[in-house]
Image: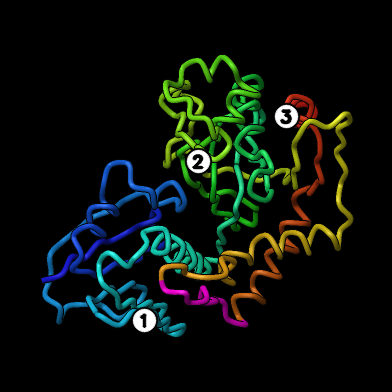
Amino acid sequence: MLYEIELKIKDYATLKVFTNYKIIKDNLISENTVIKRTIPITKITCNLIDKKNIIYKDSIIIFNSNKKTMFYDKENNVSVLNAKENEIRFMDLVYISLAMFSKLLTKQNKYLLHSSALLNPSNKAIALVGDANAGKTSLGYELISNYNYKLISNDHSIIGIEDNKVKIFGGTKDIQMRLGACELYFPELYKKIEEHPEDKWNKKIIINEKINQDCILSNDKDISEMSNIYSIVTGNFSESFLKRKDKIDEELFLYESLSKIIKGTYNYITGFEYPMPSMETEEILNNLFKLCKTISDQCKVYEAKGSIKCLAKVLSKQC
């Protein structure tokens, strides 16, 4: 018998995991599962099935084997992992799932964007895009705390078209903040946190329970029309600036940001020492290019650099 774990993002995409490893099943369906912090999964179910009932499409299949191998079937969107139970890193499974969900979403011309997405007081969505440690979560929390913004997504947001409008269709809900950033920018929040390790900048905590839950949009209320997108860098800068990108730069920035996941931006599935497979096809990338032009026509894309407090004040004036 095998576990069949079904992962769903609303009605947009469904991915199945087939495995006989209980630890993988437990990690996927636990109440605080790590996968939901990275992928905007809204429902997880689990059943026991016979091996003959495995579905070889849009699925991850994990078999017990002494020989560690990984194979990806691009046509059917199937990953097959062979390994002993203790040789499979759960985060590898998360990143594989992220890329495979990204491919599934393209069937509806929707893409995953690594960003914090917020609803501003004018009921329009904005996206904060940046590299790791750019300050997306901290800037987002400052806007939520002091400028009446609401959280749509903290890590990966879904962006696409509906009724000829660019919209955000939800995203991940756990607000993960580095303890160092929490202590530096939000001392009142830091006082509510019990654990204070020495290496505060490498320790992330989820702060959802420490804040007003009304600030986080539920899954059935988080579809919002997009207005502005910000490429951010935050830090202890003496000056802050906000600059609109040129049209061609807007389109190139959007294409690079939206193609990262589906192209396999993580160099290796480290537990297997296997390159992250690229999920894209020529059709997907052509459709993405058209989407980027549409986003650029309807939304403004800015470069934003400065301190958390100053940038939040500047961004709040644009809503």
Residue in the image at 74% along x and 43% along y: 232
- In the image, is 170 to the left or to the right of 310? left
As rendered, which of 246 and 270 lies closer to the eye? 270
Q: What are the residue bounds of the magenta stretch? A: 272-282
Task: Look at the numbered discs 3 and 1 and tell me whether their residues touch, using CB distance below 8 Å.
Answer: no
Q: Quadrant of the C terminus?
A: top right
Give residue 206's position: percent from left, percent from top. 45, 34
The amino acid pointed to by label 2 is Asp
Q: Secondary structure at mark 3?
A: helix
Mark 3 vs 2, N-terminal side: 2
Decide whether the magenta segment is chiefly helix, strand or loop: loop
Q: Residue furthest front?
A: 198
Residue count near mark 3 (Cα–Cα under 10 Å), binned few <14, some 14–19, many ≥20: many
Q: Secondary structure at mark 1?
A: strand
Residue linked to disc 1: 69
Per the image, the residue denoted by label 2 is 222
How packed is label 2: few (under 14 Cα within 10 Å), some, or many (20 or more)?
many
